[in-house]
Amino acid sequence: MMINFLSLWENHSGIIMELIRDIIVSLIIVIAGMIITRITGKILKKATADGLLADEIVTRILHRAVRYGILVICIIMILTTFGINTASLLAVLGAAGVAVGLALKDTLGNIAAGIILLLLGSYRRGEYIEFDSYSGTVKDINLFTTILETPDGLFISAPNLSIWGTPLKNYSRYGRRRMELSVGISYSDSVDTAFRVMQNIAETETRFMKDPPPQILLQSLGDSSVNIALRAWAATDVYWNIYWDQMKNIKLKIEEAGLRIPLPQRVLHIAEDQRTGIKTPGKNTPA
């Protein structure tokens, strides 16, 4: 056995030494790639903690992209170390990549849209958004789809490309929203009294923001009513609680003040035909 090994060494020592050298170089490349990947991950996590990257999902995707990129580079370097011609391999992979890209055009479009949306930070997990005819709270964002949950508990999986290609409303981004509470009173009622009622509601509702201050407006002169509006700003997380509470409160306070909330009305004019004496309905006009 020893004789065979010595004979192999004497005949092929150069090849064996070159193979050992290539293996050592390959191990160094692998270790260096692992170290670079680990350092990159720490840098991205620190950037997220310092606020340079707005979302942990962006950090995770960038880390994954860097890791796969380093893996590909390491494989190419190892193949080159062992004397394998990578130029032809890269050409084949490039041609295959073009074919796959054409076949998966929509999928790659979703990936590109997902990366752009994540980098721009148009929306983040936990925010309430609306696009096209869909709306809901963002539960997750990945390279292909965005997962939403509607207020009534429905699951929506939206391709990123469909979100990127349409105008998007983000209701949570600024942390506040302006609400408009309106009520109609009769034309025979006092507008000043209605203003005082609405002003009292604005002053007693502690959840309204003080800056900018609430506004009381004569919104419009409707067909059957004079419409008064209260506009006020509130934090996003209590917006709907205030809205529903105050809609009920406005009705109670308006009625307590002796004001009437009229129902829609129309006046029917009856015209008499002078020749036949038959009365026929004329034009309907709002009351």
Image (cartoon, rainbow, N blue to C red):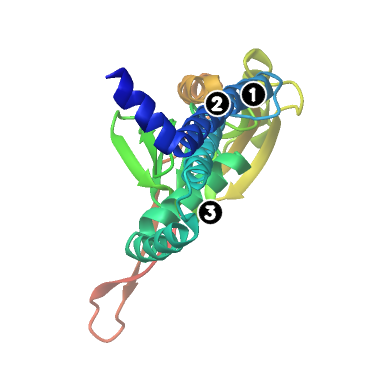
Q: Nearer the viewer, residue 15 or 109?
A: 15
On the picture, is 94 further left or further right than 277?
A: right
SS type, badge 1: helix
SS type, badge 3: loop
Q: Circle 2: is it few (<14), some (14-19), or many (20+) Cα within 10 Å?
A: some
Residue 269 location (% of width, % of height): 37, 65
Q: Nearer the viewer, residue 115 or 195?
A: 115
Measured in 3D between alpha carbons, the distance from the residue under mark 1 to the one under mark 2, in whole angstroms, is: 7 Å
* Residue at the spot 29% in from the left edge and 80% down from the top edge: 273
Q: Amino acid at mark 2?
A: Glu
Residue 205 location (% of width, % of height): 62, 15
User: Looking at the rendering, in which quadrant would you find the N terminus?
Assistant: top left
SS type, badge 2: helix
**Contact between labelled residues 1 and 3, with CB atoms less than 8 Å apart:** no
Q: Amino acid at mark 1?
A: Thr
Precedes in sequence: disc 3 or disc 1:
1
Q: Does 34 sit above or below residue 119?
A: above
**Contact between labelled residues 2 and 1, with CB atoms less than 8 Å apart:** yes
Q: Which residue is mark 3?
A: 167
Q: Which residue is mark 1?
A: 48
User: Viewer-nearest of labels 3 and 1?
Assistant: 1
User: Looking at the rendering, in which quadrant would you find the C terminus?
Assistant: bottom left
Measured in 3D between alpha carbons, the distance from the residue under mark 3 to the one under mark 2, in whole angstroms, is: 24 Å
Residue 282 location (% of width, % of height): 35, 72
* Residue at the spot 68% in from the left edge and 33% down from the top edge: 216
Could one spot residue 205 in this view of the protein?
yes
Q: Which residue is mark 2?
A: 56
* Residue at the spot 65% in from the left edge and 31% down from the top edge: 174
Q: Nearer the viewer, residue 206 or 238?
A: 238
